[in-house]
Image (cartoon, helix red, strand yellow):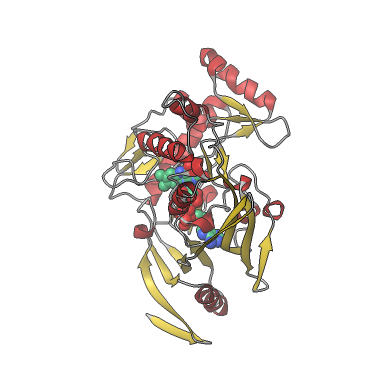
Amino acid sequence: MRRRILQNVAIVIRDGVPLAPFTTLELGGPARHFADAADEAALVEALRWADDRELPVALLGGGSNVVVADAGFNGLVVRIATRGLLFETSGGDATVTAAAGEPWDALVAEAVGRGLGGLECLSGIPGLVGATPIQNVGAYGQEVAETIRSVRVLERSSWQTRSLSPEACGFGYRDSNFKREPTRFVVLAVTFGLRPGAAPVLRYRELAESLAGTSEAPPTLAEARATVLALRAKKSMLVTAGDPNRRSVGSFFTNPVVEAAEAEAVAARAGDDGATMPRWPAADGRGRVKLSAGWLIERAGIAKGLRRGPVGVSSAHALALVHQGGGTTAALLALAREIRDTVRVRFGVTLVPEPTFVGVAWNLASG
Ligand SMILES: Cc1cc2nc3c(=O)[nH]c(=O)nc-3n(C[C@H](O)[C@H](O)[C@H](O)COP(=O)(O)OP(=O)(O)OC[C@H]3O[C@@H](n4cnc5c(N)ncnc54)[C@H](O)[C@@H]3O)c2cc1C
């Protein structure tokens, strides 16, 4: 362990720190070097420490969307632990600015508790605020791109902090410029625009149907949050102690977005099932179609609950790959590759993984 002090900023660099306990998959080897960044000065200092040594850096939030190599990471892992929440209301407008290290679901709960709409459908997503813009997290009919007003970042090449507009973030479905250029920025804080007294967003049919008829009055934000949490619990899409499906990254693959003609071809390959194949217009305004990765996986013959030793498919959700304990990242990736290949052979669609790979490349891993 070493301590480096510069301009009264102390950071502790630890060597050989196991990363598995910092991930929801509970898989992966050690970080060669590891630092916790409890404030922005420490974060900058840790990044400079790595730059001085020409070491690669991996940023870690809650570890709920990362797959770490069994060999670990041969660089510095910086765990973002910055805190701070600021709610501001002016007339009919409300914002909250949250430091990157704030736990996401606590922020959602606080917003809902204050009667502020905009985040309620994103209840129960694990991880920290700073990671939410990275893949534009979304669920149950909402995504953060709809509410993000600005993202304060540190640009790593210039060491400047900047405030990025939503347009500059380049948000797409489970995508953003942060994901496309992963070494360019560190997210320091995110400002969300919220709607005081708003009704919950009920675009997602399963959520709307679950809430329908539960009371005479229109559903409240709190009821929407409770319903989302209940739906997620049924699908093991919460990290709940004791749940055998709890070690996952949530959905392992994104839903494929394809041209309309390709969607027709996939439906044709599905035969009799094609008529009921789930599909939605993609939100990219280009006439493309979003398919359900989970449906494709199941129709390709991969059942929920499939096991390959200590890894498998969640018994509650075909899109979640789970680790049962005592497994390896290599085994998980072999199963992911098997699923990708099976779906490709059956439907001609190549599934793309959702999480970030640390110390291992998906394409190399997939052979
Ligand atoms: C049970 C379960 C359910 C899930 N459900 C959903 C869902 O419904 N919708 C959804 O979109 N996702 C879902 N996820 C995925 C995951 O929770 C989200 O992507 C979440 O935002 C990741 O946050 P994290 O703090 O754990 O990020 P991490 O896993 O620690 O990091 C993810 C990526 O973001 C980068 N990163 C993290 N913090 C920063 C920062 N401050 N600046 C720059 N880069 C950073 C990391 O380097 C890494 O590339 C689920 C995961 C699980 C385990």
Is residue 149 toward the left or the right of residue 323 in the image? right
Q: Is residue 270 above or below residue 19?
A: above
Quadrant for residue 315, please give it.
Answer: top left
Coordinates of residue 93 in the picture (x, y in percent): 63, 51
Q: Nearer the viewer, residue 342 or 91?
A: 91
How many labels sit on residues?
0
Where is residue 70? Give x, y as percent: 39, 57
Q: Residue at x 69, y 24 (%)?
A: 261
Compared to residue 51, the image places residue 270 above or below, namely: above
Decide if residue 362 is in sight here: yes
- Seen from this angle, which residue lies furthest front? 91
Residue 188 sits in quarter: bottom right
The residue that appears at 54% across and 14% down in the rendered structure is: 271
In the rendered image, the vertical position of residue 43 relative to residue 69, given as above or below: below
Q: Nearer the viewer, residue 46 or 228?
A: 228
Q: Is residue 360 visible?
A: no
Residue 57 in picture, x, y percent from top left: 52, 67
Between residue 106 and residue 173, name the one nearer to us. 106
**Image-based side of 339 in relation to 313, left or right:** right
Identity of the residue drawn at 42% across and 25% down: 301
Residue 322 image point, x, y percent: 36, 42
* Image quadrant occupied by the N terminus: bottom left
State the residue lying farthest toward the left.
242
Q: Nearer the viewer, residue 311 or 44?
A: 44
Residue displayed at 41% across by 26% down: 214
Q: Residue furthest right?
A: 286
